Amino acid sequence: MTTIVENFNRAFENRIRLAVMSILVVNDSADFNTLKEMLKLTDGNLATHAATLEKNKYIRIEKRFVGKKTLTTYFATPAGRRAFAEHLDALEKLIRRSK
Amino acid sequence: MNSVDERLNDLSEIRSLMEHSTKFLSLSGLSGVSAGTVGIAAYFIARQEMAHPWERTLAEYSLQAVVTLILALGLAVYFSTKMALKKKIPIWTPAAKHLVISLSVPLAAGGGFCYALVLHDLYWFIAPSMLLFYGLALLNSSKYTLKEIRALGYCQLLLGLCGSYWPDFGLLLWGVGFGLLHIVYGAAMYLKYEK
């Protein structure tokens, strides 16, 4: 049982971070507004959780200017994809065991 | 530690997000039914006209084609927008953009090709060519929307091929493809996902 608990990734304990990661692993990239609308989040909420994922090096954040507005785009890093896959494996194992 | 039920919830949420972020799922069955109805009406008008094809000019025929296309597309967009609004999900998502591009590139190529057929007086091949290009466009865009659209694409391809070998039935097959099949597909999708 201990090994399963260890494999649960703290970064993905939070539902919003898990949701952001789910979208980024199946898309090349996603911009701030798309994520915000899909997940029905506030600006601050999304920015905070994205910053946590970036600190873990699970996502890459790119900011550029389009006219006067900043366009923020998020990408999943290879490390992020690996961590996400491991997290899914851990979920699967837990559910299998409980059956 | 969270309960198993909560983890199962996590998984179904992950799955739904992965699907919704890559696919445009607000394609309403009513879009198909309305496009099909326009298709059938266009077929009957065209059949009447083909009895005396010289009565109208090329410009008039082109105008009819454009009006048909705008009516069918307009109704399809209307019903899908309505569905997205009802489900309170955004309509103009990146997946929707991918869908539009993957549909319109093959369709635009088909439109250009059909115009060339007109210029070379190869009228018989217009209907089957439209079916072929439309079928390819559907196959190309199927990865960005409901997977059932693939089946519709294969059927259009088959009808297009038949039409190119038996040009006498070209217009009839066009009516089957753009009219009947759209209605059948739309009704099936409506009953499966929207009832």
Image: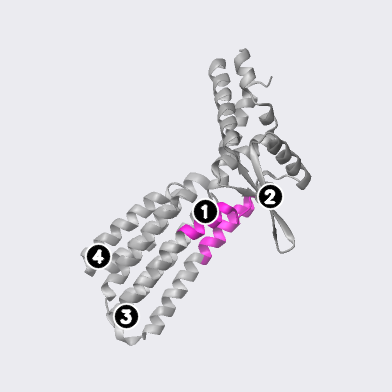
Q: Secondary structure at mark 3?
A: helix
For the residue pair A6 and A96, the one nearer the viewer reads as A6
| Chain identifier of the residue bearing label 3 in the image | B
Few, some or many residues within 10 Å of mark 2 (<14, 14–19, 20+): some
- Nearest to the eye among marks 2 and 3: give it: 2
Q: How many marks?
A: 4
Label at residue B75 = none
Report the residue marked by disc 4.
B164
Mark 3 or mark 1: whose residue is earlier in sequence:
1
Please tell me which residue is depicted at 65% across the width and 26% down the height of the picture: A9
Please tell me which residue is depicted at 69% across the width and 47% down the height of the picture: A36
Few, some or many residues within 10 Å of mark 4 (<14, 14–19, 20+): some
Report the residue marked by disc 2.
A32
Report the residue marked by disc 1.
B27
Q: Which residues are magenta?
A: B74-102
- Nearest to the eye among marks 4 and 3: give it: 3
State whether residue B60 is above or below residue A72: below
* Contact check, label 2 and label 1, Cβ < 8 Å: no
Report the residue marked by disc 3.
B119
Q: Quadrant of residue B166?
A: bottom left
Q: Residue furthest right?
A: A44
- Nearest to the eye among marks 2 and 4: give it: 2
